[in-house]
Image: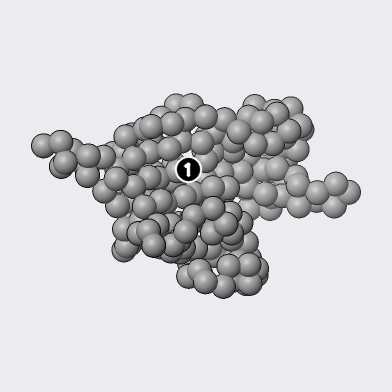
């Protein structure tokens, strides 16, 4: 019996990451949170041994617990406001145990023509004049034949670097993966090196 490996999956959706980790890691302690009750129902069915929590992670980021791995996948592009993105990354960094990892992904949709072709004008929204739209904020039309607009923010290299910096954690890996080119998402792996510093000091 090995020690427990604890995971906080922020914006867990249907629990896909948790299922993958369960199948590859013994003694997994998984905590998933999302604001969609329907997706959480799917996650609980797929991973009944996990702990799931309905939570608005933007307004109420996790404020307690220490985890070996904190994951933020498929979430950043849905969060409006640079300050909110910064505060979320800071809050998640605080949940990483000494020696643990924070891994986050940024969807780099704007770099691909197939996604840029879906961009709709902001003035198509009736309340567009009241919105606080920032650079690299976009509306993407996500259905064919029927209009379905989604807010998406493009995290460029400069913003990505700022998000890394505010965590105070040490970058140990950075790479691109996924999608039709294998490069649609940028992943960054950060480590809480406090344990290492303590053991070396």
Horizontal side, residue 186 vs residue 87: left or right: right
User: From where the camera sits, is residue 12 visible?
Assistant: no
Q: Residues within 10 Å of mark 1 (few under 14, many from 20)?
A: many
At horizontal 15% and vertical 42% (from top left) the residue drawn is: 198
Q: In the rendered view, would you say 10 is above or below 111?
A: below
Q: Position of residue 36 (x, y in %)?
A: 59, 66
Outermost residue toward the right? 145
Say which quarter of the image contains residue 29: bottom left
Q: Secondary structure at mark 1?
A: strand
Q: Position of residue 87 (x, y in %)?
A: 37, 48
Horizontal side, residue 197 vs residue 137: left or right: left
Q: In the image shown, does 157 or 29 lie closer to the viewer?
A: 29
Q: In the rendered view, would you say 86 is above or below 159?
A: below
Location of the C terminus (image quadrant): top left
Q: In the image shown, does 88 or 145 lie closer to the viewer?
A: 88
Color scheme of the displayed model: one colour
Location of the N terminus (image quadrant): bottom left
Q: In the rendered view, would you say 173 is above or below 152?
A: above
Outermost residue toward the left? 201
Q: Which residue is mark 1?
A: 104
User: From where the camera sits, is residue 101 visible?
Assistant: yes
Horizontal side, residue 65 vs residue 55: left or right: left
At horizontal 22% and vertical 39% (from top left) the residue drawn is: 196
Q: In the image shown, does 98 or 146 lie closer to the viewer?
A: 98
Outermost residue toward the front? 1
Q: Position of residue 123 (x, y in %)?
A: 69, 43
At horizontal 16% and vertical 41% (from top left) the residue drawn is: 199
């Amino acid at each position: 019996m090995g020690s427990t490996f604890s995971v906080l999956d922020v914006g867990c959706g249907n629990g896909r990451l948790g299922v993958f980790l369960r199948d590859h890691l013994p003694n997994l302690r998984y905590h998933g949170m999302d604001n969609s009750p329907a997706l959480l129902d799917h996650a609980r069915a797929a991973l009944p041994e996990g702990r799931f929590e309905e939570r608005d992670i933007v307004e109420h980021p996790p404020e307690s617990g220490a985890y070996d791995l904190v994951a933020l996948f498929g979430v950043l592009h849905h969060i409006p406001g640079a300050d909110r993105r910064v505060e979320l990354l800071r809050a998640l960094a605080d949940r990483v145990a000494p020696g643990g990892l924070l891994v986050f992904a940024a969807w780099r949709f704007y770099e691909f023509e197939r996604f840029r072709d879906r961009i709709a004008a902001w003035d198509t929204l009736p309340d567009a004049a009241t919105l606080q739209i920032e650079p690299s904020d976009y509306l993407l039309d996500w259905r064919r034949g029927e209009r379905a607009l989604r807010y998406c923010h493009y995290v460029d290299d400069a913003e990505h670097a700022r998000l890394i910096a505010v965590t105070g954690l040490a970058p140990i890996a950075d790479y691109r993966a996924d999608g039709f080119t294998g490069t649609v998402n940028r992943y960054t792996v950060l480590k809480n090196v406090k344990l290492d510093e303590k053991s070396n000091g």
